[in-house]
Image (cartoon, rainbow, N blue to C red):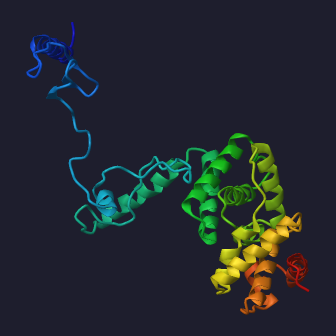
Amino acid sequence: MERPSRQRQQEREAEQETDESTVSCPECDSENIVTDADQELVCEDCGLVLDERNIDRGPEWRAFNHSERQSKSRVGAPITETMHDKGLTTTIDWKDKDAYGRSLSSEKRSQMHRLRKWQERIRTKDAGERNLQFALSEIDRMASALGVPRSVREVASVIYRRALNEDLIRGRSIEGVSTAALYAACRQEGIPRSLDEVADVSRVPQKEIGRTYRYISQELGLELKPVDPKQFVPRFASSLELSEEVQSKATEIIDVSAEQGLLSGKSPTGFAAAAIYAASLLCNEKKTQREVADVAQVTEVTIRNRYQEQIEAMGFR
């Protein structure tokens, strides 16, 4: 015995076939009437649309800008790799108020407190998920301290998950692998952050970060290009309050020096700092080596050595 809904569907299809066979086109009197992919009755000979049966699957409300669209939307947050459960979970609001904004009674408050506690406990079912949650929270913390965009956090989370799936974390600290993943994501996304800057916001030594970064980049096959010193110029120049002319001159110095092969084996931050120092002298916006070194987090000796090389490359004595 078929279900009533199935019977009704068959009846509708039979009626539709009957309609198509009996209806003729009022324009050309043709009986060649078909139903296209948009569920419209169309004459095959002249193309006249006889009947529209489209269903509007869009929202019933209208929005004229992005804020209205966001406020009227009734969907949840998008899936994100920065959370261990990818955001597919429920959360209990920390406010002790009901839907009308009224304060809850003491009994209800204690009940909500217990619910929040158990909600946090059941979100992580085993030690592996707890470790992943801790690692992703570390990536989020360090990314916030470095001021990198959301896309870098997503990429860093994906790299860490890949390292976890490949069992590359065994024998290494969670903080070290998460920091290395964030540094790799910064390089992959073209966000200029030096290893010293990443180490400053991390809880592990710089030597361990560098060693872990080289290991996971090799094992995961991350094809990362060498860091271009020109990426550091705008940020360093902005911190030193230098003009656009100095930035342009520093970029020119780096290009000329790189063409002569002076960039090979040199630190990109030190090379960029020396170029900014040289450009500030050439553009009469002098900054001391100490000021430039503090911003770039390099030593004054590094700036002096790179500065001499760049001045010779530019043809100045």
Where is residue 217? Give x, y as percent. 77, 49
At horizontal 84% and vertical 71% (from top left) the residue drawn is 257
**Image quadrant occupied by the C terminus:** bottom right
In the picture shown, does residue 167 fall above or below 78? Answer: above
Q: Residue 279: tell me if it is visible.
A: yes
Where is residue 296? Give x, y as percent. 75, 78
- Marks counted in the figure total 0
**Image quadrant occupied by the N terminus:** top left
Based on the displayed image, in which of its 4 quarters is residue 234 positioned? Answer: bottom right
At horizontal 65% and vertical 57% (from top left) the residue drawn is 189
In the image, taking residue 140 as reference, residue 210 lies left or right, namely right
Task: Depth check: give the residue in front, 314 or 52.
Answer: 314
At horizontal 46% and vertical 46% (from top left) the residue drawn is 88
In the image, taking residue 268 as reference, residue 165 lies left or right, namely left
In the image, taking residue 303 as reference, residue 12 lies left or right, namely left
Based on the displayed image, in which of its 4 quarters is residue 22 positioned? Answer: top left
In the picture shown, does residue 87 fall above or below 71? Answer: above
Task: Depth check: give the residue in front, 92 or 164.
Answer: 164
Q: Residue 269: tell me if it is visible.
A: no
In the picture shown, does residue 55 fall above or below 14? Answer: below
At horizontal 26% and vertical 28% (from top left) the residue drawn is 38
Where is residue 72? Give x, y as percent. 27, 56
Task: Depth check: give the residue in front, 99 or 207.
Answer: 207
Q: Residue furthest top?
A: 1
Where is residue 263? Give x, y as percent. 86, 67
Task: Depth check: give the residue in front, 89 or 68.
Answer: 68
